[in-house]
């Protein structure tokens, strides 16, 4: 499936929806979705699409229309804004939301999937500790990749509209 911006999106299987729900319900995302009821997280996990970006693949180019925003579920992205040094974002960071919700809707930063994988934590690190470690390698189950890149859950305009129709109490 392709979005209006030409981005390739995958249709979600029931297993993908369950994994996204598990990610959104995890301690890693707890502060982001604080106050959401379980049924609201279920609806949100059904409304998103998954995009897998290869290492060094452009995710967003400055000046594009902001028709979607996303949560990093695996890997990492590098954000370049004007003349500032690039910043690396890891799960559970959200990006693209400023243009999505702004009046002019224009992207102001370039975002690229990272060319290297995020640093790893010891395998026995509890997920609650991993959530507090910047750059931790926690990712959506089944998405671990040793070569960099990023897995992003994307919410598009039309998906948000459908979500608000299905659950009017979520409307902004």
Image (cartoon, rainbow, N blue to C red):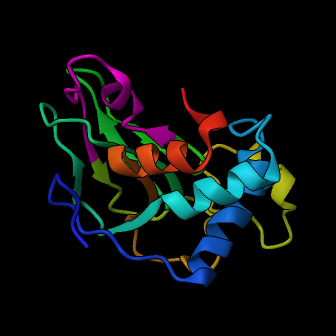
| Residue closer to the observer: 24 or 121 | 24
In this rendering, does residue 90 appear at all?
no
Taking the magenta stretch, the answer to whether it contains residue 115 is no
Task: Please give the name of the residue rendered at 16% of the width and 52% of the height, measured from the top-left corner.
Answer: 5
On the image, the x and y values in percent for residue 165 come to 51, 45
Residue 86 placement: quadrant: top left
Q: Quadrant of the C terminus?
A: top right
On the image, the x and y values in percent for residue 8 come to 24, 68
| Region of the chain picked out in magenta, as a range | 94-111
Please say if 78 is above or below 54: above
Please say if 146 is above or below 98: below
**Is residue 23 toward the left or the right of residue 44 in the image?**
right
Task: Please give the name of the residue rendered at 42% of the width and 38% of the height, measured from the top-left corner.
Answer: 95
**Is residue 152 toward the left or the right of residue 6 in the image?**
right
On the image, the x and y values in percent for residue 102 come to 32, 20
Task: Please give the name of the residue rendered at 71% of the width and 49% of the height, measured from the top-left corner.
Answer: 40
| Residue closer to the observer: 26 or 77 | 26
In this rendering, does residue 122 appear at all?
yes
Q: How many marks?
A: 0
| Residue closer to the observer: 42 or 161 | 161
Q: Quadrant of the N terminus?
A: bottom left
Residue 134 placement: quadrant: top right
Taking the magenta stretch, the answer to whether it contains residue 101 is yes
Task: Please give the name of the residue rendered at 59% of the width and 53% of the height, measured from the top-left corner.
Answer: 44
């Amino acid at each position: 499936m392709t979005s209006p911006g030409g981005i390739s999106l995958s249709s979600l299987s029931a297993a993908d929806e369950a994994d996204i729900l598990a990610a959104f319900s995890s301690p890693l995302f707890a502060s982001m979705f604080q106050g959401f009821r379980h049924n609201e997280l279920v609806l949100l996990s059904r409304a998103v699409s998954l995009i897998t970006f290869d290492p060094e693949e452009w995710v967003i180019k400055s000046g594009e229309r902001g028709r979607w925003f996303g949560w990093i579920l695996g890997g990492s992205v590098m954000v370049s804004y004007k003349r500032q040094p690039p910043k690396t974002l890891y799960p559970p960071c959200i990006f693209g939301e400023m243009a999505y919700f702004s009046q002019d809707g224009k992207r102001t930063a370039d975002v690229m999937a990272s060319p290297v994988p995020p640093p790893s934590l010891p395998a026995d690190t509890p997920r609650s500790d991993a959530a507090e470690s910047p750059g931790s390698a926690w990712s959506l189950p089944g998405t671990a990749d040793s070569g960099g890149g990023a897995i992003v859950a994307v919410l598009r305009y039309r998906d948000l509209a459908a979500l608000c129709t299905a659950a009017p109490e979520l409307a902004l």
